[in-house]
Image: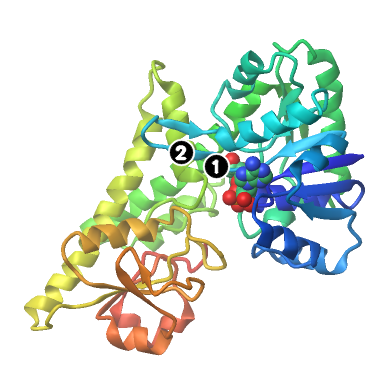
Amino acid sequence: MRIAVAGTGYVGLSLAVLLAQHNDVTAVDVVAEKVEKINAGISPIRDPEIEDFLAHRELRLTATLDGESAYRDAELVVVATPTNYDPSRNYFDTHFVEDVIELVTSVNPTVPMVVKSTVPVGYTRSLLERWPEGRFLFSPEFLREGRALYDNLHPSRIVVGVPSESVHAEELEGVAHEFARLLQEGAEDEDVPTLVMRATEAEAVKLFANTYLALRVAYFNELDTYAEARGLDAKSIIEAVGLDPRIGSHYNNPSFGYGGYCLPKDTKQLLANYSKVPQNLIGAIVDANRTRKDFVADEVIQMVMDLVYAGVRRPLVGVYRLTMKSGSDNFRASSIQGIMKRVKSKGIPVLVYEPTLGDAEFFGSEVTHDLEGFKRRADVIVANRWSDELSDVGEKVYTRDLFRRD
Ligand SMILES: NC(=O)c1ccc[n+]([C@@H]2O[C@H](COP(=O)([O-])OP(=O)(O)OC[C@H]3O[C@@H](n4cnc5c(N)ncnc54)[C@H](O)[C@@H]3O)[C@@H](O)[C@H]2O)c1
């Protein structure tokens, strides 16, 4: 099949590579550098499987800036452009998705389009008001950053949503099964659980899944806050709590808050979707993340104050990595930025150690790539995730990474 994929980020590129094992795939982006890299067999993002597949596997994959040609020739279009949360409208900004749909519709009005970007509940149905003849499907994407292709090679499930209101609903039901088959064909696991459902439910699946993950992070963080405030050993409590098989010992490592590209925005979007529907928990999950950052920042500020009382002049707080996870190559909405902002608002100087950042400053704070100098200069070091690089200055480090894993 000839497939065009719009967007070569974590979602788009992993799908493009997955599908290009058995199909002719054209990956479209608006950033020339990404297109050039992909065509040279180099991954523009850090992802071991994508890097390996682009360099060594036989793929029928071409990248291009020319969306018009790619969409005109395609038998199926996958949309994987960003949907950022817009705080002024209290809703996702979906215009990157609509830009693609507009272009696709103008050159190939009958081609089915699978939206893989995360969208508000009811979004696919709303597309039909603007494009009543459009053939839209929505398929939630569950991959993790840094394991993007791995998670598509070993998917937990494949979900495809069909808008039942569409005049093409029957035809789209068939396309949904065909798309699920293509994902299954590219995967290394067999018999992946597959669900074809209505698009609105599929949209809800994505937001509820991510909000559950945020809830779990927020829960163990709040447990940790309690233990810290009462002088208890959080690690032993979490270990014993998790041994109940209904709870489990996974995904329970305290942090400065849930972060990354998806959890902060998807929880807020789900809360916005509740609108007039009664709830307590969803709002509490969003609030809990703010409260956690306030708590962590207060602890760091207290460490600084203790140094001041001990006679240190203007103690310097070192931020060790801006990333969310240890192997990450970006720091979109990472929780440590929330700590940094709160610490700086008290007039405390901050020095950032972030080797992936080329700029000399980050929000007015100096950035260094010199780890030894960083460790020497910083009086307190905050690290969302521990690294053995910090072993020799452990007494300066503030972290809540109790289990030394993501
Ligand atoms: N990152 C994740 O872990 C993850 C997981 C599941 C779902 N999602 C969702 O998938 C969507 C994409 O996320 P991502 O992390 O891959 O984003 P990303 O920012 O890494 O990549 C998006 C890409 O789309 C490109 N783009 C923007 N406008 C375009 C256009 N008009 N035509 C073609 N390309 C265009 C950008 O240049 C960029 O390369 C979002 O809705 C996100 O919420 C992300």
Q: Are marks 2 and 1 in contact (CB under 8 Å)?
A: no
| Count of numbered labels shown in the rendering | 2
Give the camera-side residue of 105 and 121: 105
Q: Is residue 71 visible to the viewer in this orientation of the structure?
A: yes
Give the alpha-carbon distance from disc 2 to disc 1, as whole Å: 33 Å
Residue underneath mark 2 = 85
Question: Which quarter of the image is occupied by the N terminus?
Answer: top right
Q: Residue at x 47, y 30 (%)?
A: 270
Q: Is residue 153 visible to the viewer in this orientation of the structure?
A: no
For this view, does 216 lie left or right of residue 125? left
Give the camera-side residue of 353 and 36: 36
Disc on res. 388 = none
The answer to which of marks 2 and 1 sits earlier in the sequence is: 2
Residue 40: x, y in percent? Answer: 79, 67
Residue underneath mark 1 = 246
Residue 122: x, y in percent? Answer: 57, 20
Q: Eyeballing the image, is 120 above or below 292?
A: above
Amino acid type of the residue tagged 2 in the rendering: Tyr
Q: Eyeballing the image, is 122 above or below 299?
A: above
* Circle 1: element type: loop
